[in-house]
Image (spheres, rainbow, N blue to C red):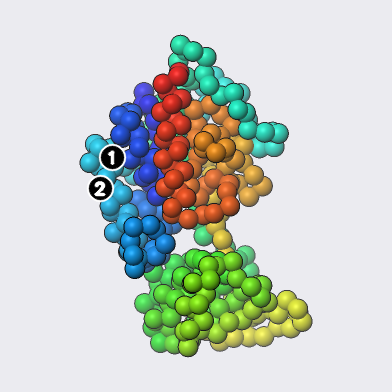
Amino acid sequence: MHDLIIIGAGPAGLAAALYAGRFRLKTLIFEKLSAGGQIILSSEIENYPGFPGGISTYELIERFKKQVQELGLTIENEEVLEIVNKGQSPQKAGHQSIRQDWVPIEGKESAPYTIKTTSKTYEAKTVIIAAGARPKQLGVKGEEKFVGRGVSYCGTCDGPLFRDKEIALAGGGDRAIEEVIFLSGYARKIYLVHRRSEFRASKILLEKAKRLSNVNFVLDSTIEEIVGKDKVEAIVVKNISSQALSTLACEGVFIFVGIEPNTEFVKNVLEIDEKGFIIADQEMRTSLKGIFACGDCRKKSLYQVITACAEGAVAADAAHRYLLRA
C-alpha cells in the first residue's frame, strides 16, 4: 500500500513528486514514455522564472528529475490502464458541481485505489493524475497518411530534416510561434497558416516571428488537405472570408493546433469536460475523494510549465493534508 501514486512525470508530476518526497510520503511515480511530457517536444523554454535568456527543456527536466531522485523517489516506466475505485460511488461527467465536503471521517482509513498498469497492480491511499496531453490533429485529408513522411507535430524532432526546404505550419498559440522561430533556422520558407487574423500567442514571440524574413503569414485561412504521392508535396488552403482555395507547394507540414488530454483511463471514473479534461477545484481535488489532478490533463485557462509545476505542488500538499486527516 502506497500513500500516493503519481501518474505522469512531466513538470506537474515531477513537482508533485518533489513535494511528496519532502512530506516523506511513500510515493510511486508512473510514466509510460519518458519524463518531461509535452515540454520535451520543444528545444528550449524562455518564460520559466529564474533562467534569463532561457534554458533547454532537456536540462530543465533533468534538474527536476535530479531533485526528485535526491529524495529517494524513482520513476517507473509503466502505463496506467485503469484506476479501480473501492468504497466510493463513481462520479461521472455531467454531475452539477465539485463537492467541497471531501474531508474523510475523523479516525477512518481512506478508501484505497487499485492502479492497474500494463504489468502489475498497485494500491494507494491517494492518487495524483498528471498524465498530461498530446498534440491535437487537424483532422484533414492526407494528415494521417503522411505522418512521418512530411507531417510532424514536433519541430525539435524533425526540423533538421527540412533544412533549406519549404514547409507549412498550422497554429496561432505560443507553441506554434515558438516552433516557427525554431524552424526558421532550418527551412528556406515557412507558410504560417492561422484561421484568424489575430494570434493568441504572446506579443514578444510574435514580434520575433514577424522579424523573420523567411516566414510568410497566411491568415484567416485553414489547411483543407495535405497532398502528395509518397510524401508531402503541397497543402490546399481555404480563405475563410472568400472561401477561395489555393495550393501552396511545400515538403513538410508542422501542426500545432492545441492539445488533447491523456485521460481515457479515467473517463468513466472522474468528472471530465466535453473535451476530456479533468474537472478539479483550486486545490486540485477531483470528483472522487483522494484523487487529485494537475497539469495539462486538467481543465484550466493557461497551459504552461509554470502553472503545471504550481498545480503539482498544490496537489501534493492537498494529498498530504488528506492523508493526515484520514
| Residue 8 position (above or below residue 290) | below
Disc number lying in front (1 or 2): 2
Say which quadrant the C terminus sits in. Answer: top left
Which amino acid type is shown beneath numbered disc 2? Lys
Residue 150 drawn at (x, y percent): 48, 75
**Viewer can see residue 225:** no
102 left or right of 122 in image: right
Residue farthest to the right, as pictured: 242
Residue 13 drawn at (x, y percent): 40, 44
Viewer-proximal residue, 6 or 143? Answer: 6
- Quick one: label 1, few (<14), some, or many (20+) residues within 10 Å? some
Q: Give the quarter of the image for residue 239.
A: bottom right
215 left or right of 117 in image: right
Residue 214 drawn at (x, y percent): 48, 87
Viewer-proximal residue, 116 or 89? Answer: 89
Mark 1 to mark 2: distance in Å? 10 Å
Say which quadrant the N terminus sits in. Answer: top left
Residue 45 drawn at (x, y percent): 39, 63
| Residue 137 position (above or below residue 319) | below
**Which numbered disc flags the more N-terminal residue, 1 or 2?**
2
Q: Residue at x 58, y 82 (%)?
A: 217
Q: Residue at x 66, y 47 (%)?
A: 274
Residue farthest to the top, as pictured: 107
**Viewer can see residue 101:** yes
Which amino acid type is shown beneath numbered disc 1? Thr
What numbered label is drawn on residue 74?
1
- Quick one: label 2, few (<14), some, or many (20+) residues within 10 Å? some
Q: Residue at x 39, y 58 (%)?
A: 48
Q: Residue at x 41, y 40 (%)?
A: 313
The residue that label 2 is drawn on is: 66
